[in-house]
Image: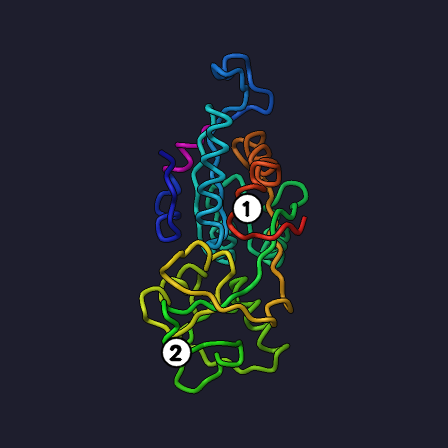
Amino acid sequence: MRRAAALAASLVVAGLLLTGCGPSSETPSPSASTASGDALAGDITVFAAASLTGTFTEIADAFEDAHPGVHVTLNFAGSSALVTQLTEGAPADVFASADEANMTKAQDAGLIDGDPEIFASNTLEIAVPPGNPAGIGSFDDLARPGLRLVVCAPQVPCGAATREVAELAGVTLTPVSEENAVTDVLGKVAAGEADAGVVYRTDVIAAGDSVEGVEFPESDFVINRYPIAVLAGSSAPDVAAAFATFVRGPSGREILDASGFGDDR
């Protein structure tokens, strides 16, 4: 079973990840071929935005099924937190961000090998507890006095998008909490600790019956585009590149579509 490295644990286990991700030659030897004839083999670590948790877990499973000699370790967190981890030396092979701004930060830091590729898009949606007890029906309702609103912190892609939508819509938001990952916003709404939270459309879909979604037309003001790239210094660049290609290919696209992501390539 693949280990899904949590944000809090990712730096603690960095040494283990280094020993667990052995180098893979760009030209695999015949001995690296699997019984199925697939020459791709090696271990990679993928750093991916929190909003990709369910989707990339499914994609990684499909990628490992297609390449039995490959093992994928996943680390999910807010895109800005992932960039911080990478700049501080956390080992990884692939970075998938929920926006282009954080990918640019990674590029500026010399962390990216080659050019990032857009593989998906996402829009905002309001998440409310089942039954919508606060009666939220529009983005304007989020400015209601006394409302327990939770959003992402501004350095996080969903938070930056929320702030931009609010500015364009002329709505002043006064959240009771700003979270470092969209999954944390969703968790507070699902637990009844908030009357409403601004998340992505895909998060509402993934949450199932634990929350309800309220769409709002202003979400079209800001559409987040998701880039993916191989990281410089990858210990298995051939496997990392194959994973990025798989995400953007038919198999990855099918999973992304089912999760509610847009195709903005």
Determine the residue located farthest toward the top in the rendered image. Answer: 30
Q: Tag 2 or tag 1, which sits nearer the N-term? A: 2
Residue appearing at x 52%, y 76% in the figure: 138
From the viewer's side, name the closer residue of 180 and 196: 196
Residue type marked 2:
Ala
| Placement of 202 over or under 173, stated as above or below | above
Mark 2 crowd level (few <14, some 14–19, many ≥20, 10 Å Cα):
some
Image position of 81 (left or right of 252): left
Residue appearing at x 52%, y 39% in the figure: 93
User: Which residue lies under the disc numbered 1?
Assistant: 256
- Write the start and end of the magenta stretch as one range: 16-23
Task: Give the spatial CA distance, label 1 vs label 2.
Answer: 31 Å
Image position of 91 (left or right of 221): left
Residue 100 colored magenta? no
User: Which residue lies under the disc numbered 2?
Assistant: 134
Q: Position of residue 222 (x, y in %)?
A: 63, 66
Q: Position of residue 4 (x, y in %)?
A: 38, 43
From the viewer's side, name the closer residue of 147 and 50: 147
Looking at the image, can residue 231 be seen? no
Residue type marked 1:
Leu
Tell me the tag on residue 40: none
Secondary structure at badge 2 equals loop
Looking at the image, can residue 34 be seen? yes
Q: Position of residue 146 (x, y in %)?
A: 39, 85
**Taken as a whole, is the magenta stretch helix, strand or loop?**
helix
Residue 20 colored magenta? yes
Q: Are marks 1 and 2 in contact (CB under 8 Å)?
A: no
